[in-house]
Amino acid sequence: MAEIRLTRVEQGQTKIRNVPIAVTPEGFWCCPSPVGFQKTLKAQNPLNKPKPSSPPPKTTVTKKQTPVTERKPTFTPSRPDQRTFVPDTPGLSAPVAAERAPRPKIENLPRKVAIEFGEPGTSDMKVILLGKQGFCVKLSVHKNVLVENSRYIADKLSQPQSGTSSLEIEDCEDVEIYVETVGLMYCKEIKQRLIKQSVSRVLRILKVAELLGFNSCMQSCLEYLEAVPWVGEEEEKVVSSVLRLQGEGIGVTPVLKRVSSDASKQPKDTLSQIIDLVLKSNEERGRREMKSVVLKLLRENNSLPSCAGSSDIFNETVYSSCKSCLSSLLSLFRHAAEPGFADKPMDYREPVVKQIALEADNLSWLVEILADRQAADEFALLWAGQQELASLHSKLPIVSRYHVSCITARLFVGIGRGELLPSKDTRQLLLQTWLEPLINDYSWLQHGCRSFDRKVVEEGIGRTILTLPLEEQQSILLSWLGSFLKAGDNCPNLQRAFEVWWRRTFIRPYVETPGNNFQSDSSMTSPVITLKKQPHE
């Protein structure tokens, strides 16, 4: 808090010019902004010439010296209830001014203004604000008003030196807001005066009101903040400012309820409801956009340390949705694999095919969420164990089933990138169960799935195969080789994985030594190039 120092105003000190202030019947004023301060200071300097288009000001100095009372500038009120204030420094005649040395530049002059509150001439106390920007503002105020509204000033004036008639506040960070806050002490309806103010300005008023112990102003600011919308970064500023007041006995709860809830409903239930609404939507564009939004928000949650404790709750909710989608997908596959289903009319088959695509898309989205949360290992095991679904896969037309292979492809990509780390048995079972269906659907995936990236998927499959023991690699890659030689581009190209397996098998074989340490045969690890001697050598 800025230090408030009690001093007496000594006679002979540099006088400070008054600034015209509009005052309402209840004592409210129009506080000059920093721009207004600058304009006032320029107007105070006689070196500034008025613009030709402006009417001659009443402060103009003429050759004939006139009495001081005739030369005081007046402020013409726009309403009958406005007051007029005048400068308290006598002007100089032109001849006297001409004999003086040249005045310093405007920017080098001390910027001093004076402001009077309430009925002119009735103030009994001075408050001097010394701003960091060079402002020196003298407030003519009423002691009883400040004591009634400011707990801090009342405490200061209750001390032995309370007989003094002046308070000085040094190093004011926000002189303008100090002036405005003091002015609000003269208002009956503070909240009405805050209407149409910006959130940032009200927060500045709230800070000064807190320093001064101006409780009614603080409460009005909180009522304003509770009702007005917060835009962009304003929310963080409002919350931090309001949290600071929790121990002041001020009602901050209504404001904080906008960002926190004491409801008994668990976050798990809310997340489950959101995911359920997205999964059951049949509107394609809405589903696609909301899936992207929810995925982005969950990623933001993952980056916050405060959300670490809720990780298990979120994962449990997502896995519950995964099992529900899997159950629905298996039921649809069974129905589509029934004898005679292909002979049914199109209007009978089409809803089933669309629902299969919908459930497969839902599962792909859920897998993406789990992969981002580094929690997809369990799903890999769950998917690898779907032998019945994989066996029914070949009984459906490829146009109805290829969406399911997108799930398999995403898991292989995740394993290849290290996003999930299932056990060796799970990886082996996943390849045994779903690699062949993926190969069978590969042609359709390339042409019918917009998000399918062939190179990424092939790299993921190859890396997954290479994580298995060498014998398993050989079995799978030899099986793939037969398919590739028949289908060509309609089969995943796993040549890079095949080359790695080849080198492991024939070029750099590892042998087990008696000490159970695996060492490479040096003669095989580094290929030896033998140069055949040419006849002319």
Image: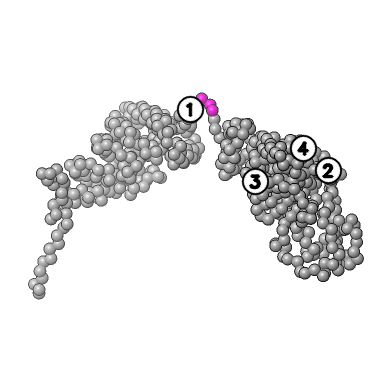
Asked if the residue at tag 1 contacts the one at tag 4, i.e. Cβ–Cβ closer than 8 Å, the answer is no
Q: Secondary structure at mark 4?
A: helix
Give the magenta range: 262-266
| Label 3 environment density (alpha carbons within 10 Å; few <14, some 14–19, many ≥20) | few
Q: Mark 2 or 1 closer to N-term?
A: 2
The residue beneath circle 2 is 122
Q: Secondary structure at mark 2?
A: loop
C-alpha separation, residue under disc 3 versus residue under disc 2: 27 Å
The residue beneath circle 4 is 144
- Describe residue 234's horizontal placement relative to residue 407 as left or right: right
Where is 6 relative to 65, above or below? above
Q: Quarter of the image holding residue 417?
A: top left
Relative depth, front residue between 174 and 385 = 174
Q: Amino acid at mark 4?
A: Asn
C-alpha separation, residue under disc 2 versus residue under disc 1: 60 Å
The C terminus sits in image quarter: bottom left
The residue beneath circle 1 is 266
- On the image, the x and y values in percent for residue 123 come to 80, 43
Q: Amino acid at mark 1?
A: Gln
- On the image, the x and y values in percent for residue 114 come to 77, 51
- On the image, the x and y values in percent for residue 495 come to 25, 50
Asked if the residue at tag 1 contacts the one at tag 3, i.e. Cβ–Cβ closer than 8 Å, the answer is no
The N terminus sits in image quarter: top right
Task: Name the mark nearer the viewer: 2 or 1.
Answer: 2
Q: Mark 4 or 1 closer to N-term?
A: 4
Task: Name the mark nearer the viewer: 3 or 1.
Answer: 3
Where is 25 relative to 99, above or below? above
Q: Amino acid at mark 3?
A: Glu
Q: Residue at x 66, y 42 (%)?
A: 208
Where is 84 relative to 319, above or below? below
Relative depth, front residue between 465 and 395 = 465
